[in-house]
């Protein structure tokens, strides 16, 4: 624990307190006292509040990524709808926390360069050392437009894009700096500069075209299991002859076609920060373990940043973090590109999901879909999206879907407007495509809505449509 004479001496500096307090406007604040946090919610209004907490032995300060109309009204009992009403904005904060310091700097630098390539001006991008092992790279809420038109043609308030939309932006940026489009250039650079041995715990092997992790594949080769004698061995070849019985075998991840392989590093860009009321360290706050401060870093200085510059005694020039005086909407291109982003492995063709036979009866629906068809407190628009794609994918006509959705909507405690149902269905009819619903592991559509539940079969399959196919097959029905 940091000694009180160290923390008090540091937080007594008026310029430090003022820079910290300026970041707290509209933010929920959590104050840490050694190894425990104080009450939540809390706020900092004046810079004197920082000193007051320090006099009570506060060691560090943390704030929400979200901005609230009244942070003191927050509570763990609030529903999603209540949080949406209280939230007036959010900041995009990328949390890079890689276990190897040199890699952390490289990854952070690459993300900054990608933001620049997306058209975000330098004045809207700021970065700071986290205080221990990582960096926070930020774009303020003011850099985004006021509203966004979603895939259904609905105008959505920008404040309502949290957390799902913000997670999408983070995933898009990570995909762009190290994905199929650039042949995993960042991973290759990390391996080249740091070596395989240092990265062995964070390396996976992926399909070069989709980025999908290949089970059983490792950097040092594929795992082979002989179907004749169960002998196991590793090789970097695509086919081998079993050393025990001579049978020709393929890697365990492949059923037929040989894929092109790439090494992929888990970049450790933490998406946990993009969740409601999750906190990150306030600018210039101290860190209990390192004793260092969370100081802003010039964009072009991240690649070479030395932690000694964050020692409390060496901080003399204060740099800004999350500047608010930026042009409104200057990050529009980033938002536009990210919200239309879909990784290659999620893209499906009509032929892959064509339904043959009569419409599947509800008795064959998986538990999460059954729960979505029940009463929902939150996420009715997301449920509408999932249910429409699911029902269409299992052979339901638009007339059947419309009747079922109206029945479902009428049973909700807070129904969607009639025009929302009509507009949603009209968009799907005009598009004329059959698209699979999200997989069960997509937290945004199942876990976050509280509908994720499994029976024995659904725990073994990825997608709701796959579940229905197997249930019908088990019953011997056409």
Image (tube, helix red, strand yellow):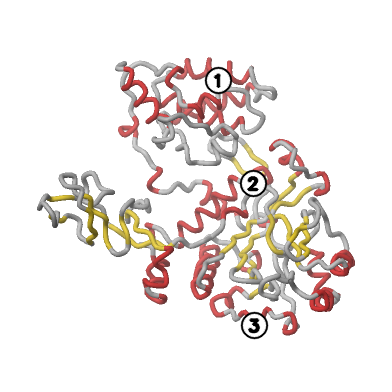
Callouts 3 and 2 close, C-beta under 8 Å: no
Q: Closer to the camera: disc 1 or disc 3? A: 3
Q: Nearer the viewer, residue 95 or 371?
A: 371
Number of residues whose C-alpha sits closer than 10 Å to that of mark 1, classed few (under 14), some (14–19) or many (20 or more): some
Q: Label 3, on which residue?
A: 308
- For marks 1 and 2, the one nearer the N-term is 2
Q: Position of residue 363 (x, y in %)?
A: 45, 17
Q: Residue at x 55, y 67 (%)?
A: 112
Does dot 2 land on a helix, a strand or a loop? loop
Q: Position of residue 98 (x, y in %)?
A: 52, 67
| Residue 310, quarter of picture | bottom right
Q: Is 297 situated above or below 419? A: below
User: In the picture provided, is 245 more to the left or to the right than 420?
Assistant: left
Q: Residue at x 56, y 30 (%)?
A: 383
User: In the picture provided, is 271 more to the left or to the right than 434?
Assistant: right
| Residue 24, quarter of picture | bottom right
Q: Is 432 situated above or below 218? A: above
**Residue 162, label in figure:** 2
Q: Closer to the camera: disc 3 or disc 2? A: 3
Q: Is 394 situated above or below 192? A: above
Number of residues whose C-alpha sits closer than 10 Å to that of mark 3, classed few (under 14), some (14–19) or many (20 or more): few
Quarter of the figure that contains the C terminus = top left
Does dot 3 land on a helix, a strand or a loop? helix
Q: Position of residue 50 (x, y in %)?
A: 84, 66
- For marks 3 and 2, the one nearer the N-term is 2
Q: Is 120 situated above or below 13? A: above
Q: Nearer the viewer, residue 163 or 251?
A: 251
**Residue 405, label in figure:** 1
Does dot 1 land on a helix, a strand or a loop? helix
Q: How far apart, in angstroms, are the residues tagged by discs 3 and 2?
A: 35 Å
Q: Residue at x 33, y 28 (%)?
A: 354
Q: Position of residue 362 (x, y in %)?
A: 46, 18
């Amino acid at each position: 624990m940091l000694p009180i004479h160290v923390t008090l001496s540091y937080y007594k500096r008026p310029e430090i307190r003022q820079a910290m307090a300026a970041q707290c406007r509209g933010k929920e604040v959590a104050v840490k006292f050694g190894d425990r946090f104080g009450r939540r919610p809390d706020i900092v209004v004046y810079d004197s509040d920082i000193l007051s907490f320090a006099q009570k032995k506060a060691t560090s300060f943390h704030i929400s990524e979200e901005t609230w109309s009244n942070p003191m009204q927050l509570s763990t009992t609030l529903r999603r709808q209540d949080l949406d009403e209280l939230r007036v904005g959010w900041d995009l904060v990328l949390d890079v926390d890689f276990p190897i310091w040199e890699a952390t700097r490289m990854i952070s630098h690459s993300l900054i360069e990608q933001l620049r390539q997306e058209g975000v001006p330098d004045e809207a991008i700021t970065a700071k050392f986290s205080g221990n092992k990582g960096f926070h790279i930020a774009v303020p809420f003011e850099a985004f437009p006021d509203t966004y038109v979603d895939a259904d043609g609905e105008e959505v308030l920008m404040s309502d894009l949290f957390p799902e939309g913000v997670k999408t932006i983070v995933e898009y940026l990570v995909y762009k700096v190290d994905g199929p489009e650039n042949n995993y250039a960042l991973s290759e650079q990390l391996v080249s500069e740091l070596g395989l041995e240092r990265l062995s715990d964070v390396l996976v092997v992926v399909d070069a075209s989709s980025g999908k992790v290949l089970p059983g594949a490792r950097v040092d080769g594929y795992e082979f299991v002989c179907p004749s004698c169960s002998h196991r061995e590793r090789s970097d070849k695509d086919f081998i002859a079993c050393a025990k019985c001579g049978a020709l075998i393929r890697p365990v991840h492949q059923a037929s076609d040989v894929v092109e392989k790439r090494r992929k590093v888990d970049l450790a860009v933490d998406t946990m920060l993009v969740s409601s009321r999750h906190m990150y360290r306030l600018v210039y706050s101290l860190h209990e373990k390192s004793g260092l401060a969370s100081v802003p870093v010039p964009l072009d200085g991240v690649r070479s940043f030395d932690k000694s510059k964050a020692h409390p005694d060496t901080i003399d020039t204060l740099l800004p973090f999350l500047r608010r005086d930026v042009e409104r909407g200057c990050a529009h291109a980033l938002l536009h590109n990210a919200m239309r982003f879909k990784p290659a492995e999620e893209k499906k063709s009509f032929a892959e999901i064509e339904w043959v036979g009569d419409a599947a009866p509800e008795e064959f629906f998986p538990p999460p879909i059954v729960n979505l068809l029940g009463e929902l407190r939150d996420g009715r628009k997301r449920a509408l999206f999932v249910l429409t794609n699911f029902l269409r994918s299992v052979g339901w006509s638009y007339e059947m879907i419309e009747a079922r959705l109206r029945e479902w909507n009428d049973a909700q405690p807070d129904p969607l407007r009639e025009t929302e149902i009509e507009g949603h269905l009209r968009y799907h009819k005009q598009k004329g495509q059959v698209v699979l619903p999200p997989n069960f592991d997509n937290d945004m559509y199942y876990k976050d809505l509280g509908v994720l539940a499994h029976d024995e079969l659904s725990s073994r399959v990825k997608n709701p449509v796959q579940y229905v196919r197997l249930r019908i097959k088990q019953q011997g029905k056409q």
